Image (tube, rainbow, N blue to C red):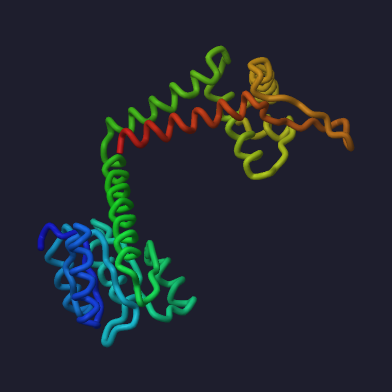
Amino acid sequence: MRDVAVIVVDDDKEFLLEVREGLALENLPVVCASSPLSALDIVEQNFAIRVLVTDLAMPGLDGLELIRRVGELRQGAQILPIILTGNASLENAIAALRMGAVDFLQKPVEIADLVAAIRRALDLSVQKRRAATLLDDPLALLRLLDGLRMDRKRVLPRVAGGDAAWEMLLDLAMAQAAGRQVSVSALCAGAGTSTTTALRRLEALEQEGLVERHPDPEDRRRVWLQLTHKGGASVRQAGRRFAETLRALI
């Protein structure tokens, strides 16, 4: 039982028997508990447990309180909750989400749906553990930062002050993604340097074909900026490379 990663908690013993047998056929061994208090004892003694499947309505201690207490027991090794319920209120659903619930399954639940939810939760647990490990690994973090530097150099190989120009490019890309227009003056003001220097970097981005200007038809004193097709593609490509580097590290 010490290697079992999933605990299922429900006061319906017939349901637990059905779940244990059904999950065993899917090569998903679980430990079952018919009361929240016995579940707490099991969790406290078994650090391999990563997923808690629990009913909400149980006598003595409901599912929400169980999730809270499990969180207190295992602060250093998060357990992801999956909720089983026959009639979850919106209030309970919101409370469970705030406690980290990753799925809700309506009773009566199909074993196939439960299997899929558990496997998703186990995958998410692995990702969270790897990400936490990354934060504690100085060498991995340095590799990630080096990957970011190389991405910038690939996009802006000939731009002086490339790091600052890259930040301006990202600021513009993020504004466009949010549906906001950005003027030349606004982008330069946010560049953290003199207007003259920011304008030089903006001109370099234009020369690389990454950014273009569009005069405001209603106010000729104002000029809007926009990523070109090449600029948008370059930012997206750098983002994909960053994601691939991150996945390789974790």
Residue sitting farthest toward the bottom: 59
Q: Is residue 80 above or below residue 156?
A: below
Rendered-image quadrant of the C terminus: top left
Residue at point 62%, 23% (across, down):
230
Q: Position of residue 108 (x, y in %)?
A: 35, 77
Q: Position of residue 203 (x, y in %)?
A: 69, 18
Q: Is residue 15 above or below residue 128?
A: below
- How many numbered discs, if any? 0
Q: Is residue 38 above or below residue 99?
A: below
Rendered-image quadrant of the N terminus: bottom left
Q: Nearer the viewer, residue 201 or 170?
A: 170
Q: Position of residue 115 (x, y in %)?
A: 29, 61
Q: Nearer the viewer, residue 124 or 13?
A: 13
Q: Nearer the viewer, residue 201 or 16?
A: 16
Residue at point 33%, 69% (across, down):
110
Q: Quadrant of residue 30?
A: bottom left
Residue sitting farthest toward the front: 25
Q: Is residue 34 above or below residue 73?
A: below
Residue at point 34%, 72% (across, down):
109
Q: Position of residue 25 (x, y in %)?
A: 19, 62
Q: Quadrant of residue 140?
A: top left
**Whether residue 209 is visible:** yes
Q: Quadrant of residue 65?
A: bottom left
Residue at point 82%, 33% (across, down):
222
**Does residue 231 appear left or right of residue 16 in this picture?**
right
**Whether residue 197 is visible:** no
